[in-house]
Every structure is written in C-alpha cells, then in structure tokens.
Image (cartoon, rainbow, N blue to C red):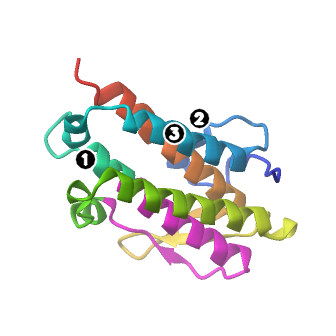
Amino acid sequence: MRRIDKPVPGEYPEYSKIYMDLLEDDGKVLEHLWTNFIAIRDFVYSLPDEMLYYRYAAGKWTIKEILVHLIDDERIFAYRALRYARNDATPLHGFDQDMYAKHSDANNRGLDSIFEEYETVRKSTISLFKNLPDESFMRGGEGIDHDGSIINKRTVRGLAYHIAGHELRHFNIIKERYLIK
C-alpha cells in the first residue's frame, strides 16, 4: 500500500498532537487505517449489547455515538483533504461534534448498520489517499473558528494521520472508560 510520511509540527494544529503521538512513524497510515478499523469492529462486537448504551459520566457519548462520531469526523476530514489536495485553499469551517452526536440517532441504529457505514467510509478514505498525486500531500489549508478567525493550518498528510489517530484516541477511551468493572 502507498507510503505517506508522518506529518511534522506545523502541518496540524497543536491539539492534534495527541492523535499524532498515537501513530508510528512508518509511513503505513493507510494500512493502519484498515487494521485499526478491523480491531475496533471486532472489539465492539465482543461487548455485551447493554455496554453499547453505557455512559461513563453524565453528558458523555455512548459507544454507538462514538462510532458514528468517528464516521462523521472521517467524512469531514477526508473532504478537507480532497479540497486541499485539489489546491483549494478556501478556509473551511469546523463542526460542532456535540451537535452532530446529539442528532445522529446512533442509539436507535443497529450495530451492523453502523459498521456497514463505517466500512464504506473507511474504504472510501483509503481509496482517496491511495490515489492522490504525490505532490498533493504537502498542500494544505486553514480552518475557520466559531468566531470567524482563521486557525488550524493542516496539510493533506496531516489530515490522513488525524483520521487514524483520532480513531485510536477514541478506541483507547472506550477501553479505558467504558468497560464496567
């Protein structure tokens, strides 16, 4: 599979460092995207059904809501990568992840339906990054904060690693905080 070098500071916002730190510097981010999807899918299917609706604290998402959040986030960040790869540097607005989760209806969906969508999005993401021109990975753009200010410079390769690291971060949170002892 295609090698994509790990981004360096300056290719992603400071808050994304927690995601970048979870990933190896081996250039195999596309392979990691696939194997991590399989790992999270197998792990979640091994959980008892009631665990999928558990909240470890008031206002926290259920596992189903986390899964749909991962799908939403991946779609949005892959779209940003496409825009920047095509040399469109138009600043892009962020999204309110809590509003998306609230309106996702994730808890009323079957796990099979969630993972069918997740797999479709993941295959699309891998295909996008696999087929981009080499020179596009260093292209980038900026985000627009809620107050209209420009923030968050990112490169295309920074976005690929964001998607992979963001997923791992949530997988770790599920394993650490959602398993009822």
Circle 2: residue type:
Leu
At horizontal 38% and vertical 50% (from top left) the residue drawn is 67
- Mark 2 vs mark 3: which is more N-terminal? 2
Q: For numbered disc 3, what is the local secondary structure?
A: helix
Q: Which mark is residue 73?
A: none
Q: Which mark is residue 168?
A: 3
Q: Quadrant of residue 21?
A: top right
Asked if residue 4 lies left or right of residue 60, the reply is right
Circle 3: residue type:
Leu
What residue is disc 2 on?
22
Q: Is residue 19 above or below residue 78?
A: above
The part of the chain drawn in magenta is 68-97
Quick one: quadrant of the C terminus?
top left
Q: Which mark is residue 61?
A: 1
Q: For numbered disc 1, what is the local secondary structure?
A: loop
At horizontal 45% and vertical 62% (from top left) the residue drawn is 117
